[in-house]
Image (cartoon, rainbow, N blue to C red):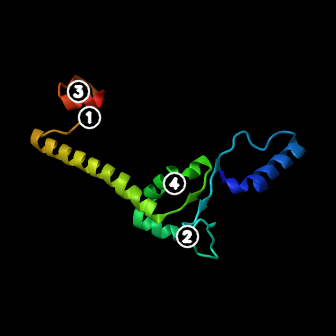
Amino acid sequence: AEGLDQTRGWFYTLMVISTILFDKPAFKNLIVNGLVLASDGKKMSKRLKNYPDPTLVIDSCGADALRLYLINSPVVRADVLKFQEEGVHEVVRGVLLPWFNSFRFFTQCVDRWEGLAGCKFVPSTEVAKSSTNDVDIWIMA
């Protein structure tokens, strides 16, 4: 996968060289992603230092939040993304924390159930399908 800006310089060159030398295309499939620009809309540059330090973003939000932010961005459709660190924080607040809280609630319920029942919790689709509880039926639908 390469950025859209590499299309002319890199992919066309590969195609020409491969066709001349081997009389076949250089690749069968090609994945192109869009450009990730700085928050001001300019190309990210080491010289201008107009981007947040990736290590600090990962340390403060986590790699999963950064991955989700990028995978849900226009970049995967070969469009331009103005990178906003606040967007990564929003993924943490809006997606990861609710998932984590739901998981934590589930594990607390399992721990409580195991303490009361005196046996290990074993998930079973058969038990879930045979339940007459309205919520269980709704979840399994």
Mark 2 touches mark 4? (CB < 8 Å): no
Residue 52 relative to residue 115: left or right: right
Say which residue label 3 marks.
Answer: 127
For label 1, the crowd category at 10 Å Cα-Cα, with few meaning under 14, some 14 to 19 and many 20 or more, is few
Tag of residue 123: 1
Q: At x 51% / y 70%, what residue is drawn?
A: 52
Name, please, the residue furthest toward the front: 40
Give the Cα distance between marks 2 and 1. 46 Å
> In the rendered structure, which amino acid carries the disc numbered 1?
Pro
**Above/below status of 126 relative to 70:** above
> What is the secondary structure assignment of the residue under circle 3?
helix
Q: Quadrant of residue 120?
A: top left
Q: Quadrant of residue 36?
A: bottom right
> In the rendered structure, which amino acid carries the disc numbered 2?
Tyr
Sequence-first disc among 4 and 3: 4
Say which residue label 2 marks.
Answer: 51
Mark 2 touches mark 3? (CB < 8 Å): no
Q: Name the one closer to the observer, 63 or 134.
A: 134
Q: Quadrant of residue 130?
A: top left
Pair 2/3: label in front: 2
Quadrant where the image shows the C terminus: top left
Say which residue label 4 marks.
Answer: 70
How far across and down, in percent of the image, does residue 10 sit? 76, 54
Residue 58 relative to residue 137: left or right: right
Give the Cα distance between marks 2 and 4. 15 Å
